[in-house]
Image (cartoon, rainbow, N blue to C red):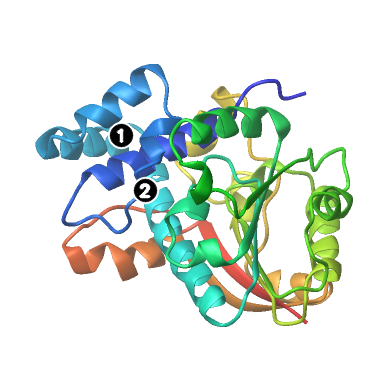
C-alpha cells in the first residue's frame, strides 16, 4: 500500500516549476509548483529562476531522461486549454481525478466559478493539502473540495457523492498521469462510473501510454525503467487504434487523441523550442453520451 506522497507527482511538479521559471517563452504559469517540492528539487527550481541556469538544467534532464519533461509541459498546456474550453461551454463542476500536485484549481481563469473536486490517494492528498494551506488564502480555495480515495480499493462514486459532488451536472474531468499506474479493471470501472455520474456532453480528459510500451514492442527509451526505479511502474496502457471503440462501449465518444509530441509541436515549436516530447504518451478527450 502506498504510504508516501507520489514521487512521480513531485517530479511533474518540478517540470512545471522549471517551465514557470522560463519567463517570456513559457507556455503556462504555475506559481504553486515550487511549493510542492522538497530538498534538492526545491533548490533546483529556485536556481532555475536565473534563466541560463534553468535552461541548462532542462537540457541536462532531457539528455539524461529523454521525454518526460517536455511531455509533461506539453500535456499540461493542452489540458489547461481543454479545461478552459469546457468551462466556457458551461461545465459547472471540475473533477481532478488523481490530482497529484495539480494546481489548476487555483490558477486557471474562471475555475473559481465552478465547484472543483480533487480526488486522490490519501497519502498524496494529505501532503498537498498541508502545502496548499500554507500558500493559498482561504477565500481562494473555498470552491475546492478534497476527496481522499484509493481507486484500487474504494468506489469513486460513493466518495464523490459523500463530498457533495452533484450527479448528472455538466462536468469536466481531468485524469492526468494516472491510468498508466492502474489495473485494467480499475480503469474500466472508473470510466463506467464517470459516465453514469456526469451529464451528457460532459468532458473526460485523460492521459495514457501506448500499450506497446508495456511489452517492449515500442521503444520508450529509459523512461519505463526510471518509473520502475521510483517504485511506480507502468501497469496499463491503451491501444490508440482501438481506443474509440473502447470508450464507446463505456458510454463515451472519443473527441481528441493527441500525442505529447504533437502537443509540443502546437505549443513549443512556435516559440522556437525544439524539445523531444514522446509520441507514445498521449492526451485524449472523450464526451459523455
| Residue 199 seen | yes
User: Which residue lies at the image location 29% right of the left edge and 59% below the top edge?
Assistant: 27
Q: Is residue 139 above or below residue 243?
A: above
Quarter of the image for the C terminus: give it: bottom right
Crowding at dot 2, Cα within 10 Å, few <14 / some 14-19 / many 20+, comes out as many
Residue furthest to the left in view is 52
Q: Nearer the viewer, residue 125 or 58?
A: 125
Residue 208 place in picture, x, y as percent: 60, 55
Q: Quadrant of residue 18?
A: top left
User: Which residue lies at the image location 66% right of the left edge and 63% below the top edge?
Assistant: 239
Left/right of residue 178 with respect to residue 59 in the rendered view: right
Residue 225 place in picture, x, y as percent: 53, 31
Q: Give residue 30's mark.
A: 2
| Residue 66 seen | no
Task: Calculate the distance from the C-alpha at mark 2 to the C-alpha at mark 1.
Answer: 19 Å
User: Which residue lies at the image location 22% right of the left edge and 38% below the top edge?
Assistant: 59
Left/right of residue 160 with respect to residue 50 in the rendered view: right
Q: Is residue 194 above or below residue 185?
A: below
Quarter of the image for the N terminus: give it: top right
Q: Is residue 187 above or below residue 183?
A: below
| Residue at the spot of label 1 | 61
Query: Which tag is nearer the camera, tag 2 or tag 1?
Result: 2
Q: Earlier in the sequence, mark 2 or mark 1?
A: 2
Q: Give residue 100's mark.
A: none
Residue 120 place in picture, x, y as percent: 69, 41
Residue 185 place in picture, x, y as percent: 85, 50
The residue tagged with tag 1: helix, strand or loop? Answer: helix
Q: Nearer the viewer, residue 123 or 237?
A: 123
Amino acid at each position: 500500500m502506498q504510504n508516501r506522497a507520489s514521487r512521480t507527482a513531485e517530479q511533474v511538479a518540478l517540470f512545471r516549476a522549471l517551465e514557470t521559471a522560463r519567463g517570456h517563452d513559457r507556455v503556462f504559469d504555475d506559481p504553486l509548483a515550487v511549493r510542492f517540492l522538497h530538498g534538492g528539487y526545491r533548490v533546483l527550481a529556485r536556481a532555475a529562476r536565473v534563466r541560463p541556469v534553468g535552461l541548462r538544467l532542462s537540457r541536462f534532464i532531457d539528455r539524461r531522461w529523454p521525454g518526460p519533461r517536455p511531455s509533461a509541459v506539453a500535456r499540461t498546456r493542452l489540458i489547461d486549454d481543454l479545461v478552459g474550453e469546457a468551462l466556457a461551454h458551461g461545465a459547472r463542476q471540475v473533477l481532478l481525478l488523481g490530482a497529484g500536485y495539480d494546481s489548476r484549481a487555483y490558477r486557471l481563469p474562471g475555475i473559481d466559478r465552478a465547484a472543483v473536486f480533487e480526488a486522490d490517494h490519501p497519502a498524496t492528498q494529505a501532503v498537498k493539502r498541508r502545502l496548499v494551506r500554507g500558500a493559498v488564502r482561504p477565500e481562494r480555495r473555498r470552491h475546492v473540495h478534497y476527496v481522499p480515495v484509493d481507486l484500487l480499493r474504494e468506489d469513486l462514486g460513493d466518495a464523490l457523492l459523500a463530498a457533495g459532488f452533484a450527479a448528472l451536472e455538466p462536468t469536466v474531468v481531468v485524469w492526468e498521469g494516472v491510468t498508466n499506474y492502474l489495473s485494467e479493471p480499475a480503469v474500466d470501472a472508473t470510466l463506467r462510473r464517470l459516465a453514469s455520474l456526469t451529464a451528457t456532453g460532459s468532458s473526460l480528459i485523460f492521459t495514457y501510454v501506448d500499450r506497446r510500451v508495456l511489452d517492449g514492442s515500442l521503444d520508450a527509451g529509459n523512461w519505463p525503467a526510471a518509473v520502475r526505479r521510483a517504485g511506480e511502474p507502468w501497469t496499463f496502457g491503451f491501444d490508440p487504434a482501438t481506443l474509440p471503440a473502447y470508450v464507446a462501449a463505456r458510454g463515451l465518444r472519443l473527441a481528441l487523441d493527441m500525442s505529447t509530441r504533437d502537443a509540443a509541436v502546437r505549443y513549443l515549436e512556435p516559440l522556437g523550442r525544439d524539445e523531444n516530447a514522446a509520441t507514445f504518451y498521449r492526451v485524449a478527450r472523450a464526451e459523455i453520451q
